[in-house]
Amino acid sequence: MLNSMSNIQDKVVIITGASSGIGEATAKKLVSQGAKLVLAARREDRLKKLQEEIQNDGGQAIYKVADVTSHEQLAELAAYALEQFGKIDVLVNNAGIMPQAFLFKKKIEEWDQMIDVNIKGVLYTIAAVLPSMRERKSGHVINLSSVAGHNIYPGGTVYCGTKHAVRAISEGLRQEEAMSGTNIRVTNISPGAISSELLDTTSEAEMRAGLDDFYQVAIEADNIAHTIAFAIEQPAEIGINEIIVRPTVQVG
Ligand SMILES: NC(=O)c1ccc[n+]([C@@H]2O[C@H](COP(=O)([O-])OP(=O)(O)OC[C@H]3O[C@@H](n4cnc5c(N)ncnc54)[C@H](OP(=O)(O)O)[C@@H]3O)[C@@H](O)[C@H]2O)c1
C-alpha cells in the first residue's frame, strides 16, 4: 500500500548491497513509501528476484549488477539511474563486508577487501552520484557505518578502522556540501547487531563462534530500514546527521 503523503514518494534511491540484509530491507521499506529504486550488488539472481517481488506489489525498481570496488561500474550505475529516472535523490551507501580476525593472523587479503569495499566503495559511490546531486542542488547521501565506527574491539581492528573511516567521510562530506550551499544532506547510520548475512564474511572459526554468541541479541534489518526512512522523510532543510541503533540489550 503506497503512502502518498510521504516525503519519500517519487524519490529516486540508489541502494548498494541491495541483495541481502539491510539493503534488501531498506528497498522493501522505501518502495512501500513510493520511492523509485535502483538496486545494486554483485548477485544478479538476488537483485532480479527482489525487483520482481517489488514490481508484483506495484512498486518501481530497476537493478544493475555493480561491484563497489570498481569506480567504473559505479559510474555506470549512476548513469543508468539518470537515464531511467532522470535524477538521483538519495544514495544508500550500504555494501559492506566484515571478515574479522586478529591482526597477528595476517589476513592481508581480507584487509585489502575490507578497505576496498567498505572505504573505497563508499567513496567511489559518492563520486558517482555527487555531480548530478550538486548540479540539481539537491540530494541525500546515507552511509552505513557501524557501532564499530565508534568502538574498537579485538579481532575487529580493520573492520572498525573502515567504519571509523566511513564516519569521517560522512562528516567531511557533510561539511563540504554545507559550506558549498548544495543542499545535499548527509546521514551516517551506525547499527549494532543486526540479523543479516554479514557474519558469513568472517571465515575464522573461533572468531565466528564469538560473533554468533554476540549476535544472539541481534534485531531485524527492517529496524535499520525504518531509521533510513526516518532520515529521508525529514523536510529538505533538516539533516539527520548521526544515528546509532542498537538492540536495547546490546552492551558494547
Ligand atoms: N549486520 C550488522 O550487524 C551490521 C552492523 C553494523 C553495520 N552494518 C553494515 O551494514 C551494511 C550492510 O550489511 P548487512 O548486515 O546487510 O550484511 P549483508 O547481508 O552481508 O549485506 C551486504 C551487502 O553488501 C553487498 N556487497 C558485498 N561486497 C560487495 C561488493 N564488492 N560490491 C557490491 N556489493 C557488495 C552484498 O551483495 P553481493 O554479495 O550480492 O554483492 C550484500 O548485498 C554493511 O556496510 C555493514 O558493515 C551491519
Image: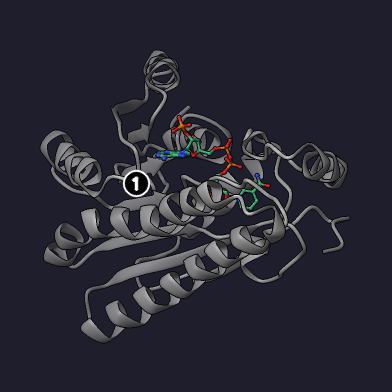
From this view, report whether residue 181 is shown above or below residue 153.
Answer: below
Which of 240/250 is in front? 250
Specify whether 240 is left or right of 38.
right
Quarter of the image where the C terminus is located: bottom right
Specify whether 75 is left or right of 115.
left
Q: Position of residue 153 (x, y in %)?
A: 76, 65
From this view, report whether residue 197 is shown above or below residue 153.
Answer: above
Q: Residue furthest bottom?
A: 179
The residue positioned 40% from the left and 42% from the top of the image is 16
| Cβ of mark 1 under 8 A from ligand 1 | yes
Q: Position of residue 129 (x, y in %)?
A: 23, 55
Q: Position of residue 160 (x, y in %)?
A: 63, 63
From this view, report whether residue 106 is shown above or below residue 22.
Answer: below
Which kind of residue does numbered mark 1 sit on? Thr
The residue positioned 35% from the left and 35% from the top of the image is 40
Label 1 sits on residue: 69
The residue positioned 65% from the left and 35% from the top of the image is 196
Is residue 7 visible in the rendered structure shown here?
no
